[in-house]
Amino acid sequence: MSLSQLARALADGTRSARSTVQATLASCERANPRLAAFQALAATDALACAERLDAALAAGAEPGPLAGVPFATKANLCIAERETNCGSALLAGYRPPYTATAVERLVAAGAIPIGTTNMDEFGMGSSGENTCYGIARNPWDLGRTPGGSSSGSAVSVAAGLVPFALGSDTGGSVRQPAALSGVFGLKPSYGAVSRYGLVAFASSLDVVGVLAAEATDLATLLAVLAGPDPLDATTVRIEGPGNEADRELDGLVVGVARETFGPGLDPRVEARTNEALAALERAGCVLREVSLPLAGQAVPIYYVIATGEASSNLARYDGVRYGRRVQGDDPSLDAMFEATRAAGFGDEVKRRILLGTYVLSAGYAQHWYTKALRARRRLVHEFDAAFREVDVLLGPTTPTPAFHLGERVDDPLAMYACDHLTVPASLAGLPAVSAPVGTVDDPAGGATLPVGLQWVGPRGSDARLCALVAAADRLGAPFTSALAPEVSA
C-alpha cells in the first residue's frame, strides 16, 4: 500500500494506527533476519505513539497528512533517548538528548518512527558493508549490495516493510541505494531540509533525504520536511510546486550530459537509460545534449573536500564527550585518544580521516583543498550554464546494477567510482531524484536487478522535480517499479 493510500485509510478509520504499526513490526521481525535492514525496532515507543494518535483521532482531532504512517530512520539521525550509533562501534550505546528536526516534522505530521536502519559507518561507503551492525542485503538478490550508505533504509522500502524511510546523502548515499534497490530516492537541494540532528560527515555536502516506494510520495514528504529551521542556519526556503504547466512533460527541455555516458557505464544500464529518454521524447520532451566537463573530475574533487570535512567533524570522537572510551597503555590523554579511535573507527573511516588530515595539513591545503574548492565553484558554474539551456538533466544514477557483496571491499578506488554519477549534483547543492526505470538480467544467470534514472534540477526546484518524476511515472513502462521478487515470493 502506498503512503497516500495508507494515510487515507488511517484518516477515514478504515485502519487504526495501532493495527498498522503492529502489522509493520511483525513484517519487519519476520524479514529482518534475512535482510538485516534494521539495527533495532522501537516497538514499545511506536505502539504507544500509535495508541495516542488513535485516541486523538477518536476525540475528533484533525489527522495530519501522514497520520499513523510508519517509517524508518537511518542510524545517523538523532531520536531522543534512542541509540544513534551511525553504524560505528565508537558510538555504540550513545543516546542523544534531542531529536532531529526532520524526524520531529514527520512525527508532527502524524508519522510514526518504528526503527533504526543499518548504514555504512558515519555514511562512508557505497555498499553498506562498512558497518559493525550487520550488512543489509538487497532483496532482489541477497548476495548483492543494496547500495550505501543508506543501505538499510533502501532495503526497508524495497522489501515493502515501510512506505518510506529517511536517509542521508553526501555524495549519493540516498540515490545510489535507491537505484540499486529499485525505489525512489530524493536528495533535496542543500539547505532545503534541516540538518539539525543529522550526525555530520561532510557539513557542506550532507543533506537529509527520503526513500519511497511511490513517485507521488516524494512531493508529500518534501512538503512536510522542507523549510527554514532556526536550529540550522544553512536552511533556506525553496519554491513550491508551481502551476499545472510546471508539472507537464510536453515541452520540457531535457538535458543529457555527454559525460554521463563515458567509460565504465554498463551497456545494460545505458540501454535502459536510452529507453527512458526515448519514452520521454515520445511524451513531448525535447532532448538536448549538454556538456559538464568537470563532471568527469567530480570524484577527486569530492573526495578531497569530503574527507577534509570528515577529518574535522570526526575529531570530536576522542573518548571524552561521546560514545566509547578505551584506556591507552599509559594514563595520558593522548594514549586514551589513540586507543579509543583505533578501536572505535573502522578501516574506511580511518582511511578518510587520514586523507582529510593530509589535504588540510600545512603545506598541502593550498595544493589540494583550496584547489578542490575552486574546481567545485567552476562545476557550479557549468551547471548554471546548462540550466540556462535546459529544464532538467537526466542520466543513469549508477554505472552498474547492484554488485556482489565483497566484490569491491578490497578496492577502495573501485568503490569510490560507484558514485561518480551522483557526486556532481552533491557538489553543486542541487536537488536530484533517482527513479526506477525497469530491470536488467544478470548475464551469469539468476538475478534480475533494477536500474535507476537520475533527475537533476536547478537549485531550489525540488518540488517541481518531484512533480516531473511523478508525471513520468504515470507514463508506465519503462518508468515502472515493483517489489523485489525475494519479497513478493
Image (tube, rainbow, N blue to C red):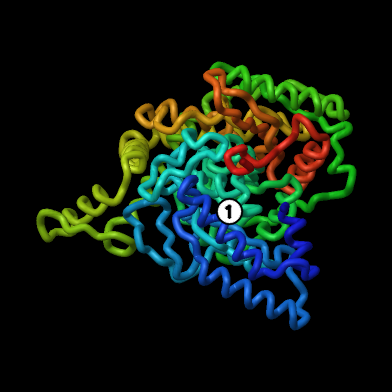
Please, which residue is most extreme toward the bottom here? 59
Please, which residue is most extreme toward the left here? 330
Quarter of the image with the C terminus in it = top right
- Please determine whether, in this image, residue 366 is positioned above or below residue 429: above
Q: Is residue 344 visible?
A: yes
Residue on which disc 1 sits? 166
The residue at the point 49 percent across, 41 percent down is 137
Residue 230 at x, y = what percent? Answer: 59, 66
Amino acid carrying mark 1 in the image: Leu
Residue nearest the observer in this picture, 379 or 9: 9
- Please determine whether, in this image, residue 149 is positioned above or below residue 265: below
Quick check: 15 left or right of 401?
Answer: right
Q: Image quarter for residue 66?
A: bottom right
Q: Is residue 207 visible?
A: no
Residue 86 at x, y = what percent? Answer: 42, 53
Quick check: 280 left or right of 302?
Answer: right
Please, which residue is most extreme toward the front here? 489
